[in-house]
Amino acid sequence: MNAPPARRLRVLVNPNSGTKGGLPTNRAASDDVRAAIASVLPDLGNDFIITASEEEAIAAAREAAMLGYDAVIAAGGDGTIGTVACQLLNTKTALGILPLGSVMNVARMLGIPRDLHEAAAIVAAGHVQTIDVGEANGQLFFEGGSVGLHAAVFGKAQEADAGRYHALLAALWVLLRYRPPRMILHLDDRVLTTRALAVAVANGPYSGLGFTVAPFADIDDGKLDVVVFSRFSRTELIRHFASIAFGRRRFTAKTATYRSARVRLEGVHPLPCRADAHDLGVTPVEYVVRPGALRVILPASPGQALEATLSGES
């Protein structure tokens, strides 16, 4: 019996992953990634790239997909994973994940552990599943989008994360002045008009600082979870998000959740909107799901119809 052909894998490492507000949150270095991979895939060879820029990561991932690699392994945070994943959409090249970031929403929603050696073992096993990807006004996203108060606040928080701490005062000012605007939501099967502090459009359960915004969202169901925060005071919304941070699942029944493959949001006045860490400007905005657009190496889950191996089709 002939042995199966060796898999072609490329590892892309972002050496700058694992910081928040300029402070280190993950001590793993490139040598740790190399050691973790070598412990389970000793025949990987030298296709191990420490990227110097986002442009280099894009070019290396795109090249691997064009050359028919079985997988590109992104070692970094959610930003690195998103950058690499965008180059692999609708190709046969799967995405592997080695978590090096601070929050790791994507890894958490896919069941990939933070431990490098455990994550490397998942890559070595090679079980692949297709997952959905979102798109909003041309911007791809993997976690979710937001419109309204938390989109405005998350934008300021992202500035603080980059070391511009005065943005925290701006975020506080937004919280104090924000009033629930009237929004119109166009879903697959209905049109809703509501006054809401915020609306979240979730591809998976987690976004931001590990907020469990949509605890029942599935990343492979061909739908987006649209969560409307319409009966919250500002204080209640802050308390709610504090209770669901870092993957916790304490959530309030005050939210209303709808599932739709497409949602268009309009405001009586322009409202800030985002997708993952990307600023989309202001409403109107349309979020759509791209079902099964990305192949990802995941922990083995016997019995799931979407599961496959790197040598087969999903």
Image: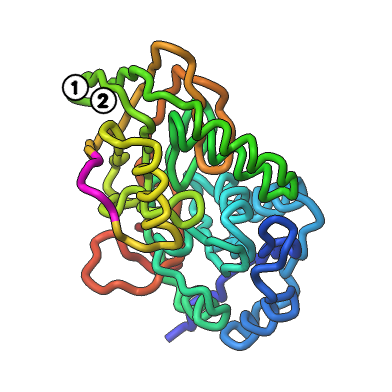
**Residue plotted at (67% across, 46% down):** 160
Mark 1 highlights which residue? 190
**Residue plotted at (31% across, 60% down):** 249
Which kind of residue does numbered mark 1 sit on?
Answer: Arg
Number of marks in picture: 2
The Cα atoms of the two marked residues, 1 and 2, are separated by 5 Å
The relative height of residue 116 versus residue 98 in the rendered view (above or below) is below
Q: Is residue 258 left or right of residue 72?
A: left
Secondary structure predominantly adopted by residues drawn in magenta? loop
1 and 2 marks in contact (CB < 8 Å) = yes
The relative height of residue 92 versus residue 138 in the rendered view (above or below) is below
Quarter holding residue 244: bottom left
Whether residue 37 appears in magenta in the rendering, the answer is: no
Q: Is residue 39 visible?
A: yes
Mark 2 highlights which residue? 187
**Residue plotted at (54% across, 78% down):** 120
Q: Nearer the viewer, residue 197 or 314?
A: 197
Q: Residues within 10 Å of mark 1 (few under 14, many from 20)?
A: few
Give the image location of residue 310, x and y in percent. Answer: 45, 67
Q: What secondary structure is marked by label 2?
A: loop
Q: Is residue 140 left or right of residue 253?
A: right
Q: Nearer the viewer, residue 217 or 63?
A: 217
Q: What secondary structure is marked by label 1?
A: loop
Q: Nearer the viewer, residue 23 or 143?
A: 23
Q: Which residues are magenta?
A: 251-255
The quadrant of the image that shows the N terminus is bottom left
